Amino acid sequence: MEKNPIPQGRYLPAKKSNGFIYSAGMTPRLNGKLILEGKVTSDKEISFYKEAVVQATKNALTAIRNTLEDGEVLEEIINMTVYVNAEEDFTAHSKIADLGSNYLFEVLGEKGISPRAALGVLTLPGNAPVEIQLVASYKKL
């Protein structure tokens, strides 16, 4: 089992309730440190942000998986919300979100693809470029 991302405040990385697991918003932290900081800008290729988006998505999925107990399995991702710390004229939010969706598809197949929202925001904690929040369903075997 992978270690949970290190919370940056007083919150749970993820919580189960009535067949669902909700992750906290996860930034691209590795061992508690952001791997990329700053605004998402239109002068950089979308691929520049891939490692950060994948790390944030991986953190959310890890937090979800770590709530599962013996005899429980992750069914599917139900929803994904992607917050983008975007400069004012950036409009390719969905392409940033695709980086996270593609990671979930690689790891979970069709069960990783869900409805999602990609939102541009003025700032994010620690000046992170992106924050990912997932909702998943689980079942007992």
Image (spheres, helix red, strand yellow):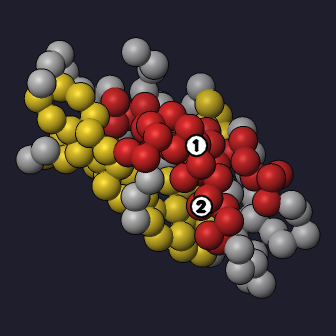
Return the residue found at the far right: 43
Q: Which residue is drawn at 28% across and 34% down?
A: 74
Residue 5 percent across, percent down from the top left: 47, 31
Amino acid type indicated by mark 2: Ala
Left or right: 75 with respect to 55? left
As drawn, 41 above or below 57: below
Mark 2 vs mark 1, CA separation in Å: 10 Å
Q: Residue at x 79, y 60 (%)?
A: 46
Quadrant of res 10 = top left
Amino acid type indicated by mark 1: Tyr
Q: Report the front residue among 117 and 63.
A: 117
Residue 18 percent across, percent down from the top left: 9, 47
Dot 2: what SS? helix
Dot 1: what SS? helix
Residue at label 2? 97
Q: Report the front residue among 141 and 23.
A: 141
Q: Which residue is drawn at 59% across and 49% down?
A: 102
Residue 105 visible in this rendered orientation of the protein: yes
Q: Do the residues labelled 2 and 1 touch (CB within 8 Å)?
A: no
Return the residue found at the far front: 110
Q: Residue at x 75, y 65 (%)?
A: 40
Kindly identify which numbered label has been placed on residue 103.
Answer: 1
Quarter occupied by the C terminus: top left
